[in-house]
Amino acid sequence: MEKGKILLALTGIHPQRWRELLSAEREVVLEPSGADDPSITYAVVWKQKPNLLRSLPNLRVIFSIGAGVDHVFADPGLPDVPIVKVVADNLTQHMVEYVVWRVLDHHRQASLYRAQQQKKIWHEPPQRVAGDVSVGIMGLGSLGRAAASALLSLGFAVNGWSRSERPMTGVSTYAGEAGLIPFLNATDILVVLLPLTQQTQGIVNYGLLKELRRRNGLGGAVLINAGRGRLQKDADILRALDDGMLKEASLDVFEVEPLPKTSPLWSHPKVFVTPHAAATSDPAHLVPIMLRQMAAFERGERLENLVDRKAGY
Ligand code: NDP
Ligand code: OXD
């Protein structure tokens, strides 16, 4: 197969660095040029414009620059070609750091110490050990499993929930609808690392948060969402924080992004906000993986990290 040309179609992300790195090996066309171009074989995308890809007569593979692919499926004219998602050590490492950072922040009561410091209060609250705290990870995929390993090595009790059975040494695993309530009932700190699909949209709602374990050494249940904003109901999280169903939350993602300035989440004393920054896609690490995959594809080899179109992730 001939060396294919790439269409780069990124919305909300500056394309320059991606273009430079991809151009080292292949011809790159920057959207909006390239529509109808029969010499384009690959599309590298983030939130591509609707119906853009279906105008390419010889498109063979779509590469998402993110681990999540909900942005690809948002296109009503998405052509029926393979979609490759990101699985990369660098991205995984960023996510593991984020999850460990946020879990430890809640576990070690950082908000209490910050409040004490402001008032110059010298007081040592009781300490518990990680083994007394149970972290439940929703989504035991490449990111969830890596986060689970890191938490296990710190001594936390770890639960995991996935669509299919995903056994993991040291982790109490639960699967499917039948496993959800038992998983939540055994979880003090909930970490959401699910993809956004038709099945998972809005799953982090008041009814779900109510099921978390609250009578624990932490003094309540904690939510950490680094998956996607539309997995959660922002208003339900606020309600749960205000009526005590949740003690605290760390949120990296929101129903609407950027988080509107009017959102009460910005200034809520029990909420820690980051701007969808848990694990950024770094072109220096991701482009070589994409270029390797393109070359392998042209040699007739199988693509890796393919999205299951039916499952939506
Ligand atoms: P994977 O596809 O590797 O794993 C997804 C996991 O979710 C799997 O364990 C899967 O189950 C589970 N899952 C999917 N649907 C359901 C369902 N209906 N019920 C129960 N479990 C379900 O994804 P990654 O780990 O690579 O990434 C996860 C998500 O993290 C991405 O989709 C993206 O949205 C988000 N992300 C966020 C970033 C940020 O900066 N905030 C950065 C990178 C990713 P099974 O194992 O059975 O298939
Ligand atoms: C991703 C993201 O999906 O950055 O990789 O959100």
Image: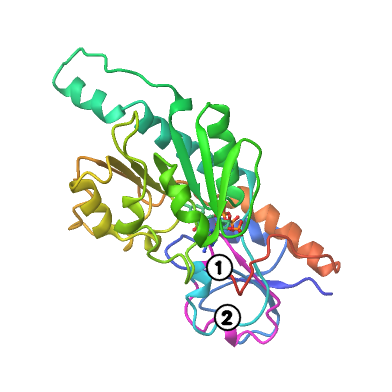
Q: Amino acid at mark 1?
A: Val
Q: Amino acid at mark 2?
A: Leu
**x and y percent of residue 171 in the render?**
59, 39
The numbered mark at residue 53 is: 2
Magenta residues, as a range?
48-69
Q: Earlier in the sequence, mark 1 or mark 2?
A: 1
- Quadrant where the C terminus sits is bottom right
Q: Nearer the viewer, residue 64 or 154?
A: 154
| Residue in view at x 24 percent, y 59 percent | 235
Disc 1 within 8 angstroms of ligand 2 (CB):
no
- Quadrant where the N terminus sits is bottom right
Q: Nearer the viewer, residue 273 or 22?
A: 273
Answer whether residue 67 is magenta in the image: yes
Q: Residues within 10 Å of mark 2 (few under 14, many from 20)?
A: many
Q: Dividing the picture into quarters, in which one does residue 120 lie?
A: top left
Q: Is residue 204 visible?
A: yes
Q: CA distance from mark 1 to mark 2?
A: 10 Å
Compared across the picture, whether 208 is left or right of 243 comes to right
**x and y percent of residue 276 in the render?**
40, 52
Residue at the extreme left of the image, as rendered? 119
Q: Which residue is mark 1?
A: 45
| Residue in view at x 22 percent, y 52 percent | 238
Q: Dividing the picture into quarters, in which one does residue 207 lie?
A: bottom left
| Residue in view at x 47 percent, y 49 percent | 182
Query: Where 302 falls versus 116 (above or below)?
Result: below
**x and y percent of residue 190 in the render?**
41, 45
Q: Are marks 1 and 2 in contact (CB under 8 Å)?
A: yes
**Predominant SS of the magenta segment:** loop
Query: Where 68 falls versus 158 (above or below)?
Result: below
Query: Where 62 falls versus 168 (above or below)?
Result: below
